[in-house]
Image (cartoon, rainbow, N blue to C red):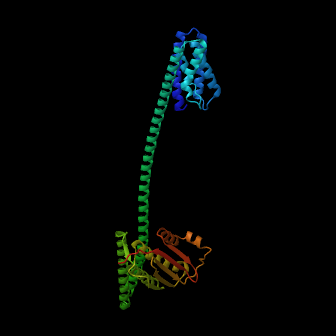
Amino acid sequence: MNMKKAVRYIISMLMIFTLFIVASISSEYDTAITISFFLLVTTFTLQSISDFYNIPLTVLQLIASVIFGIFSKNPLCYLLLCQVELPKFRISRILMPAVCYFVTAMINGNTLYNTLLYTVLLVVISAVIFAVEVFFTKYIETRDKLKHSVSICTLGELNEKKLNKELRIKNYLSDRNARLEERENISRSIHNSVGHSITAAIMTLDAADMLFDSSPDKAREKVGTVNERIRDSLASIRRAVRVLDNEDKPVPISDLCDSLEVICKSFTMDTKIVVRTNLSGCSQDKLIPSVHAEFFCSATSELLSNGVRHGNADTFLVSLTSDSRHLMLTVTDNGKSDFSEKNSKSRIHNGFGLKKLISYCEKNGGKAEFSNPAGFKSVITLPIIEEEN
C-alpha cells in the first residue's frame, strides 16, 4: 500500500465508522445501513490493497455510499461519496456528495432553503476533507523523501570516506612498492658490481700471496689491481647510497657515463673479455632521474653477464646516445644465440632479467627492445629531464 492510499484508507475508515454511528442513531433502516456499512468497509479495504485501479469496486463503493446516504436520513452521511475516487475527475470528490444530496432532497420534496444550505455545507466539508487528505499525503511524502535524501547523503559520505581511505591505502602501497622495487634494483646493482668485484679482489689477493716469494713484482701488480677494484667498489657503494638519499633528485648524464665506464672496465678486468664503449653521443649536461641512472648501470651489468653466460660472447660494444627527449643505451655482443623474433616472447617471459628490464621501462615511459641480427643486441630507452645544470 502506497502512502496516498494509506492516508485515504485511514480517513475513509474514520468517516465510515463515525457516520455509521450517526446513522444508527437517526435512522430507522438498520438493515440497509448495516449492509451498506459492511459493503463500504469491504470495498474500501480491497481498493486500498489493490495495485491497480479497480472499476467494479469503485462502482460498488458509489452504490453503497448512495444507499448509505439515502437510508441514513442524515445529510452528513452523503460525505462518504467524497471518498469515491474517479481518477480523471478528482474534483468530483468535492462535488459528488452535494450533488447526490441535492437530487435526493428535491425528489423527497425538501424545502429549497434547507436543501441549498446542506448542499453548500457538504461542498465545504468535502473540500476540507480533500484538503486535509492532500496535506497529510504531501507531508508524509515530503518527510519520507527527506529521510531518503538524508540516507543517500549519509551513504554517499560513507562511500566517499571509504573510497578516500582505499585511495590513501592504494597510494601508500603503490609508493611503498615502487620504493621497494627501486631498492631491489639498487641492491641487485650493488650485488652484481660490488659483490663480484670484491670476490675477484679476494681471489687476486690469494694469487698475490702465492707469488709474493717467487715473483714479488707480479705480486705487487696484483695488489695494485686489487686496490683499484676496491676503490671502484667503494665508489659504486657511494653512488647507490646517494641514490637512496636523493631518490627524487636528477643527476647529470656525465655521472652516468663515468659509472658505465667503471662497470665496463671492471668487467674487462674480471673476465678478460673486450668491452668497448662509446659514451660521447649524448649531451653530458642533460639530467635524468637518479633511479634511471642506477637502472642503466644495473642493466649494463645484467646484459654483459647474459652475453657471456648465454651466448659465449667475447666482445661487447656499449654505447649511450640521446636526442632532445630520450636517452638510449645500446649493448651489442658477438655471442651465439637462438633468440629470434618468433621465440622472443617466450624467451623474455621465461627469463627474469629481460622481463624486469622491459617492466621498468614500460612503467617509466620508455621501452626495451631485443634482437639477434648478428649477435645479441639490446636497446633501452628512457626519458630525459628537460633541465640544464
- Which one is nearer the viewer's eye here, 259 or 123? 123
Image: 88 above or below 98: below
Residue 30 position, x and y percent, is 58, 10
Q: Which residue is drawn at 49% across and 77% down?
A: 303
Image: 91 above or below 265: above
- Which one is nearer the viewer's eye here, 176 or 250? 250
Q: Which residue is drawn at 45% across and 48% down?
A: 159
Residue 213 position, x and y percent, is 36, 89
Q: Which residue is drawn at 36% across and 80% down?
A: 230
- Is residue 203 shown left or right of residue 351? left
Q: Can residue 55 be seen in this view?
A: yes
Q: Quadrant of the C terminus?
A: bottom left
Residue lying at the far right in this picture: please name it. Answer: 56
The answer to which image quadrant residue 287 occupies is bottom left
- Is residue 16 shown left or right of residue 190? right
Image: 45 above or below 354: above
Residue lying at the far front in this picture: please name it. Answer: 112
- Is residue 114 shown left or right of residue 292? right
The answer to which image quadrant residue 291 occupies is bottom left
Query: What is the tally of numbered marks visible in this picture?
Result: 0
The answer to which image quadrant residue 62 occupies is top right
Residue 86 position, x and y percent, is 59, 29
